[in-house]
Amino acid sequence: MRRSFRTGLGIAGVSALALSLAVAASPATALGTGSEPVPPAGLTGLEPTGADMPTVGGNLGNQHYSGLTQIAKENLAQLAPTWRTHVSAVEPASDDTGQQTTPIVVEGVIYLDTPSGGVIAVDGASGDAIWKWEGGSYGLSGTRRGVSAGDGMIFTLAGGSRVVALDQETGDEVWAVQARGPEGESLGGFGKVATVYNDGIVYGHAADGNRGAVVALDADDGAYLWHFFGGPQRGEEFTGVDGVTFDASETWGPVLDNGTDCALVAGAAPWMHGAVDPELNMYYMTFGNARSCTSSQNGSLRPGDNLFSSTMVAVDAATGDYKWHYQSIRHDVWDMDNVHPPTLADIEVDGVERKVAFYGSKSGHQFVLDRTNGQPVLPVIDKPMITDSRQVQPDTQPFPAERLLPDCVVWEKLDADNIPGNPWRAVPNYNGYQPDAEGNLVFNPDSYVAVDEPYLTYPEGSSGHREGCMYDPQWDVPILSTTSQNGGGDWSNNSYSHSTNLVYFPYGTNPVAHWNGASANGQRAIGQYQTGGILAYNASTGAVAWENHLGTDMSHGQGPLTTASDLLFVGQIDGRLLTMDAASGDVLWDFQTGSGIASAPITYEVDGEQYVAVFAAGATNPYGGSVTQGDSLWAFKLGGTYTTESGSQEGPDTAPLSIRRPVSGGAVAGETVQNTVLLARSSRTADTAAAQDSVSANAVQPTHLRVPVGATVTFRNPGAETFPNFPNLKPHCATQYFEGEFNVKLQPGETYEHTFDRAGEYFFNDCTDPRPTGKIEVYLDPQDTAGALTFRPDVLDLSSPSGLFTDVTGKLTAHFELPAGYTYESGAVLIAPLSTTPIEPSRVTANRNRLILQFEKADIDNNVPSGEVALTVRANVLGATGVQEQLSSTATVTVIKDTLNVSATPRLLGSKVFLSVSATNNASVPADIVISTQFGGKTFTAVAPGETVTASINTRGSSITPGEATITATTVVVGETQTRTKTAPFGAFPASG
């Protein structure tokens, strides 16, 4: 297969290839050995995975579905961690954190990218590191999304845009190449995307550069085989399986007068790995948005559909020959490019077996395509669109008949009783939707959007204005729409379950404002809630079966894994690993890893035991620096006994996320600027034309003002009295959202004063142009109330009868005595020493002079160590004058976590060594305790809580070698038998030396 292709390369191609390999400074200098491909253990096309999970998609069809069933709904309460490996701590060690990779498993060994961008091999049963590679002489590529395996090698990326092969058993470098085309041409930068291996070929996606490409290399030595660009060469023709020939470059308009061919600097990057159908011998890849000739949001110089941007393309897996394509967005000017790992499946539609590919992410919908020819299997509608003549846009865009997420934002009333409101809630003033006297957001045709009207054409039946819907056009002023360049499904993988016939689609909500020149391909509206969840839809009909809006963004690596026991595993950026019912979407189990998850879980089997593993390393999108970073690879199995340094099996709660899109700039203390905010100015001091009536995002000075409760803030539209040379000339607003606390319109020179009597975050923007956004942070200084707090009991028993975190149950009650004249208002929380995230009570009872709070022990367990621990309670109260205050008090408790304390001590009695083995029952119920050693044992029944039992065992020898005693405690809790086993080591006796 590969041999015949190389024969046809030609003398010029061979010479250029040899040159490119020499430049790569690599051991590879030939065109490959032609050896027979050896797939990794467990590699499947579209069949469920078994003991191994050898690709980042699970199988070659990216189904993320396993046939393992040992872990099931019936025993899920027994699922617990069995080991944790800090991969950066493994030599050669670093302090790097964060990564977007999904691990693979081959023959019980886990392979994954490290936070630095290297590769590590970890024993799947023990968590022990086998080898670690940190880039050799090439350096590392940083952000990584997965490795692949085949022919006894692990394929990854390295610095200098290199593709690298490592020996699977040792981690030694086998070859490294800087891939170039047959004429020595650049193919772009290899820096993020997971490699894919199949049948002796390594597929790499060059996504970093002006022109994206998918490249196939010979797995033997990295020799170039073929490539496919997202932006076609001028005059390049393609003939598909339908026999139609077309020139893709014609979809980009003519070459510009300055000689620029927009297709050749198109971007159209393949940001995620592809899928393989071994039966059809096709490789499926998704290309990103066009971003050439001015910007990604200005299509005026590239008229046409701009193939193959925002397109899925299928090619011959061996030769790269074009087969078919399906474009999800024509002439994309929104960066809604739908780049994600395609998912393949064989399903039944209307009683007929169909080979399909599921395609679509950012747009919040998926096309179900026939993967043999690219034709839609489920209905697609060509929907008439609003167009802007300056953008030379098409009149229609394709939409699946069955939508997954809303097409439009929601303009909800500003109301303190509706917080946070609908997940697709729009920030006021965008698109001309301004609040009326009651806070309702009403379209104002005379607002800033009127400037576009001469260029807009509305389809029949339209409202006659842009409502914030998918593909609403923009030009120089901001137009808000959904989903966004960072929303919908973005690049998280999907999962397809053979058992439920559902496709699982994680998503994020983050509406965006586009305009020409907007940085980062659009401004996600500041102050909006950045949330998300996961939904499931019927693969055969497209209808949504269920949706669970979990509350955090799920579109940036938080991919799901499903199993044949109808479980769904998925991680969240707040550090939690969830197990959900794949049929209903209900959360059945959750575990706090202690750092954010931007990786899909995996499952595998070693020695008859099923494991689930996840890499909790953290990331940034969309929550920036608020995400807790880490480097932990966790593995779970039934009855796992691993505990963290705190004595809990879980990690501490991660730091609070910046759920609301933050303003630019740091906090400024109110007293340093006289509690005054200047509107529509990018500087508090610059009296310049550039600062006048500014529309930049930071055109509120300061953007973040911090004041105490009770402070009065002055909002000023600065006129000539402030800036005599270049005063503001336009009226400007301060519209607070989403509570509707204030909404004022000020002429130049006017001011408005507002007194803040409650703590909170108060975002506001401008009706003249909604981009400038500020925030008033109103805070309370906690007042220490010594002696007011007591815990009942003051010994906090967090022990688990089984030793599993799932059996930490019960409540802790806190009594907070309020000073005379104070009443409880809101916000009571517990502050524990291991986390900055407050713990909310499950129940609050406010009596006249006392606050009684109940906290779930399971919420406290992972946030406190054992021993003497100081716990703090804070609560917002109202004093006699009705002013909001915050009271705080701290008390010390004794934390107990271990239900079974054990020890083993040898001693000499006469001429014989006796082994004294003790066990203390720290459980809250009686326990049957069995002590076992190689010399004998003893059984104790109904050992009371807190009681210690001791067995003195005659070893019948005058000396013993080191060993351990095994102690098993059995309890019955709520009718369920639970067993805890621990070992007590003992040394040689008499001691040598």
Image (spheres, rainbow, N blue to C red):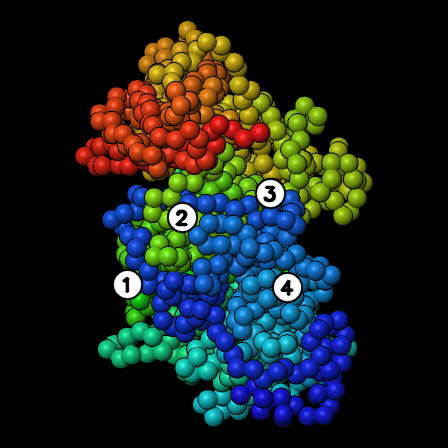
Is any part of residue 735 visible from this angle? no
What residue lies at 60% left-to-right and 45% top-to-bottom? 89
* 607, 30: nearer the viewer: 607
Q: Amino acid at mark 3?
A: Gly
Q: Earlier in the sequence, mark 4 or mark 1?
A: 4
On the picture, is 182 further left or further right than 603?
right
Determine the residue located farthest toward the left in the rendered image: 975
Indicate whether 69 appears above or below 703.
below
Is any part of residue 968 visible from this angle? yes
Q: Nearer the viewer, mark 2 or mark 1?
A: 2
Q: Position of residue 8 (x, y in %)?
A: 63, 93
Which numbered dot is residue 625? 3
Quote the CA–CA distance across marks 3 and 4.
35 Å
Q: Position of residue 886 (x, y in %)?
A: 49, 19
Q: Position of residue 970 (x, y in %)?
A: 26, 33
Residue for badge 4: 172
